[in-house]
Amino acid sequence: MRTCIDLGLHQDPQPLSSVSPSLLETRRRIWWSMYSFDRSMSLSCCRPMEVSDNVITAHLPTFRIGFATENKAEVVSGYLQRYRILQLQSLIYDRLNEQPAEQEEDAAAVTLHLAEKLENWARNNSTSDSTGLMKHELLMGKMLLYRPCRLIPNRTLYELEELWRSSLAFAQIYRALAASNSIFYVRIASEKAYWTGLAMLYCYWRLTNNAMAGIILRPSELWAATRDVSCVLQALSGRWGEGKVLCSRFEEACTRVIQATEVDGNGGNTSERSDSSVPEEVRSFCNYSSLTNIWTAARGKRPLDIHEEQLRGLALTLEGWKET
């Protein structure tokens, strides 16, 4: 990605006539392929992107040159749809991870505006999606939109319910993809699955036994939902060694969250006095940033937890550094 930026592929040459149509198309295809990979990796790990969208001027490729396939129109449409939804996911992530002091607009208005953009994309891209790939990108956008974040660390009950439903649907699609061996970028998929699982646990923790919540969640529902995530992580861990850390960490978090939110024998809610037993990655989900490389240092041994929060804070600090 950095090499592409050094070569200037993120910006179309000016004037366009200075390069041949074939070379221009090749530049664009290379750039948007790398953009797709970078955004997928960054968003799955909740880390800053390599380059800000506001400096990208390269148009989307046309696929009119040297691209022959039996179902060309459908394939090309799929590529373009994904590029656009990744741009939208990138926008959502950037807007909602700005420092509150730097955000002049009302946070609720920002969320509503971004939600409308997502709905517009869904309406304009309602073509056949037998594999669920486009639907899963839409659900990823919704999870990014409704998760607790730097701008809005405390979400409304409605937003948490939307996050819960989106994460459940996302995990179901991912489990089907993993079962059919249709996932190629294993680390990205593993990170996304783990991140989705944490979203489920966070919503369950916040919504359980809340009298104002529009839905009532039970341990059996959480178990059924997180089973999809566990199946994905188990399936992929054989192809990516570090995925085993995510799998074991997630199963441990599930157990601790259920224990912390159990109802005692008198029908009282024990969640408030048990919050300290909720895993740190769930309690501070608004600050989440992947730490798998750190966890698996020294042949898979995780460092002491005392260092983890310090490193998470460093990741948040880096979040504010924008490519210009």
Image (spheres, rainbow, N blue to C red):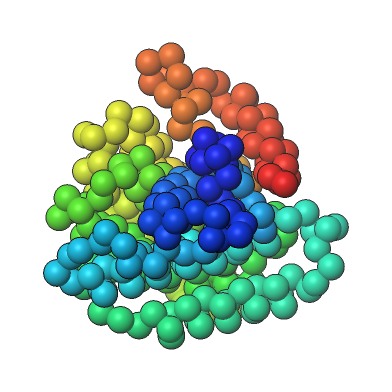
Q: Residue at x 63, y 30 (%)?
A: 311
Q: Of 39 and 30, which appears nearest the observer? A: 30
How many numbered tags mark residues here?
0
Q: Of 122 and 12, which appears nearest the observer? A: 12
Outermost residue to the top: 298
The answer to whether 167 appears left or right of 132 in the picture is right
Q: Residue at x 72, y 59 (%)?
A: 151
Residue 282 can be seen, yes or no: no
Give the image location of residue 191, x and y in percent.
Answer: 41, 44
Give the image location of residue 57, x and y in percent.
Answer: 60, 59
Give the image location of residue 175, x and y in percent.
Answer: 25, 57
Look at the picture and state if 244 lies above or below 194: above
Q: Residue at x 61, y 59 (%)?
A: 15
Q: Residue at x 56, y 78 (%)?
A: 117
Residue 310 can be seen, yes or no: yes
The answer to whether 175 appears left or right of 25 in the picture is left
Look at the picture and state if 130 lies above or below 31: below
Give the image location of residue 9, x and y in percent.
Answer: 53, 48
Outermost residue to the bottom: 123
Q: Of 311 and 4, which appears nearest the observer? A: 4
Please identify the quarter of the rendering in which residue 185 is found: top left
